[in-house]
Image (cartoon, rainbow, N blue to C red):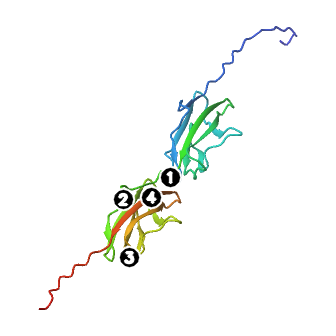
Amino acid sequence: VDSYGFSVTQIMNINVTAVDIAVRPTRIVLSSGLAKTVYTSETITASGGRLPYIFVMAMGTQLPRGLSLIAITPDSAVITGTPERADSTPVAANFVIDVVDSNNNRTSKNYSITITNPVITLSYPTRLLSGSTMSPYSDTVTASGGTAPYVFTVKPGTQLPTGLSITSSVSTGTISGIPLDAGAFYFTIVATDANGFTTEQEYSISLEVMVVVDLTVPLE
């Protein structure tokens, strides 16, 4: 409208292009983790929008217990932490991360992380060294797969031969003592690591009666 009241109308077209925010990694399955062990961090990045981005967990979804989503740069966040013990193993957690740029453009990405409890193993063979009664005995079992130190015990309801006991040192359990009874003995050893994860294995020991040879020469 000019100063004389004349006006003109012009139709203008404005094209609005939707912003396509790309979230990486593009794979759905992220690195797996081990309970009670620091998680190998996964970095989530965004591009295509306007910095900075906000990374949040979508409502109703969550990371495995013990892990967190933390922003580290204007265009990235990291999944980090120490996952808690899994009630059953393995446990796959499916979750969604929402990404919002500074213009309120948003997108979502589905991911999955599997957490497993460590698998502790006890050494083989399960048949330990043989021995003799009334003679010093010693043999060892070792544990691996968990976090040292381990505690070695005999499972209730089973027992070592009378006179023997088991002691613990880092990753090794030593069975030692002076056995009193002969025979084949079967028992179960339980190994518990520093984080409370356990395993058990049956072992056996064969003990013979010590033969005493009288080398004295009779007097004539």
| Residue occupied by mark 2 | 127
| Residue occupied by mark 3 | 180
Separation of disc 3 and disc 4 at Cα? Answer: 21 Å
Q: Nearer the viewer, residue 51 or 158?
A: 158
Q: Label 3 sits on what residue type?
A: Leu
Separation of disc 2 and disc 3 at Cα? Answer: 19 Å
Number of residues whose C-alpha sits closer than 10 Å to that of mark 4, classed few (under 14), some (14–19) or many (20 or more) = some
Q: Is residue 91 left or right of residue 211?
A: right
Q: Nearer the viewer, residue 36 or 199?
A: 199
Q: Nearer the viewer, mark 3 or mark 4?
A: 3
Which mark is first along the chain, 4 or 3? 3
| Residue occupied by mark 1 | 37
Q: Secondary structure at mark 4?
A: strand
Q: Is residue 211 left or right of residue 55?
A: left
Separation of disc 1 and disc 3 at Cα? Answer: 44 Å
| Residue occupied by mark 4 | 202
Which mark is first along the chain, 3 or 2? 2
Separation of disc 4 and disc 1 at Cα? Answer: 28 Å
Residue 8 place in picture, x, y as percent = 82, 8
Separation of disc 2 and disc 1 at Cα? Answer: 33 Å
Position of the N terminus, as image quadrant, is top right
Number of residues whose C-alpha sits closer than 10 Å to that of mark 2, classed few (under 14), some (14–19) or many (20 or more) = few
Residue 126 place in picture, x, y as percent = 38, 57
Number of residues whose C-alpha sits closer than 10 Å to that of mark 1, classed few (under 14), some (14–19) or many (20 or more) = some
* Res 144 → quadrant: bottom left
